[in-house]
Image (tube, rainbow, N blue to C red):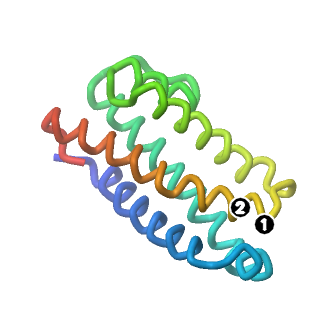
Amino acid sequence: MPSPGVKARVDRFWRAVKRLEYFKSYSRGEFTSNEDLIDSCERNLQVAIEALIDVGEALISNLDWRTPKSYREVGVILKENMVLADNNLKHFVELVKIRNILIHNYVYISPERVYEFAKKYTTILTALMEKIINFMNSMGIDP
């Protein structure tokens, strides 16, 4: 039986990704001139990345793999245990960096970068979460 926390994070991840898809429907100009869209996109991007990391950590804990010392290491451990491939790890690490920018260096991120992140990484976020969930299912772990 999954932890209600894991299920809630997976559900919130899909809600955030749906919102990110919505933001992608705007042109760059429409997006960057609307502060509500920018703020909402930043938040949903952050939430999707956080949820991805949290679900990865839950899988690591559930299978008693070594404890990650950083968010980046969550991806490394998932790769070591063949949940993620090399290119997936590269994307996971990029997403951790984006998360850190959104949380710690938010004053320096331009609306254009937020738009670019949403455009580029929504599909990647989806693919990574699907990889983790598929692995969980293959191990009989109900996400």
Q: With respect to residue 102, does 112 lie above or below?
A: below
Task: Give how far apart the Cα atoms at labels 1 and 2 are.
Answer: 5 Å
The quadrant holding residue 62 is top left
Residue at position x 71%, y 51% from top? 103
Give the amino acid type for the residue marked by disc 1 in the picture: Pro
Element under disc 1: helix
Say if 129 sits above or below 24 in the image: above
Identify which residue is drawn at 46% across, 64% down.
17
Q: Position of residue 98 (x, y in %)?
A: 67, 46
Q: Disc 1 marks which residue?
A: 111
Residue ID at (71%, 53%)? 102
Q: Amino acid at mark 2?
A: Val
User: Are the residues tagged 1 and 2 within 8 Å (C-beta)?
Assistant: yes
Label disc, if present, on residue 114 of the rendered structure:
2
Most foreground residue, 121 or 106: 121
State the image coordinates of residue 46 (x, y, percent, origin top left).
60, 56
Which one is in front, 96 or 86?
86
Residue 38: numbered disc = none
Element assignment for label 2: helix
From the viewer's side, name the closer residue of 18 and 139: 18
Instruction: State which quadrant residue 118 falls in.
Output: bottom right
**Residue 134 percent across, percent down from the top left:** 24, 42
Q: Is residue 128 above or below residue 90?
A: below
Question: Would residue 129 appear left or right of 116 to someone viewing this image?
Answer: left
